[in-house]
Image (spheres, helix red, strand yellow):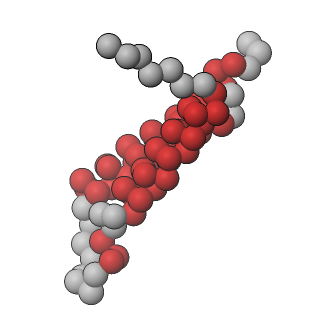
Amino acid sequence: MTVLRLDSAHITTVVWLALAATALLSWWPAPGHSAAPVSPSTLVTGAAIALGALKTRLVLRYFMQVGTGPR
């Protein structure tokens, strides 16, 4: 079994791709893409908030170095 090891530059690239994917994923279910009337959706709202929380965690951890800062 081969273990994939990523260095810092590759991890940053993978996280950036994940952020781009979540941006597209949060845009896709938005109701404003069709001519149909827009109605509120708890499921879409909850999914958008969850994806926003995930993106916030990724940005804080990998781009702002919050985990490696002084205490």
Picture coordinates of residue 28 (x, y %)?
Answer: 33, 64
Q: Residue furthest right?
A: 70
**Can residue 60 be seen?**
no
Which image quadrant for residue 25?
bottom left
Total marks placed: 0
Q: Nearer the viewer, residue 14 or 31?
A: 14
Picture coordinates of residue 53 (x, y %)?
Answer: 46, 41
- Which residue is depicted at the point 44% across and 22% down? 4
Picture coordinates of residue 29 (x, y %)?
Answer: 30, 63
Which image quadrant for residue 68?
top right
Q: Nearer the viewer, residue 45 or 1?
A: 1
Decide if residue 22 is on the left or right side of residue 9. Answer: left
- Which residue is depicted at the point 68% across and 28% down? 65
Q: Does residue 19 lie above or below 11 as drawn?
A: below
Q: Does residue 7 lie above or below 27 as drawn?
A: above
Q: Residue furthest front?
A: 2
Decide if residue 70 is on the left or right side of residue 66. Answer: right
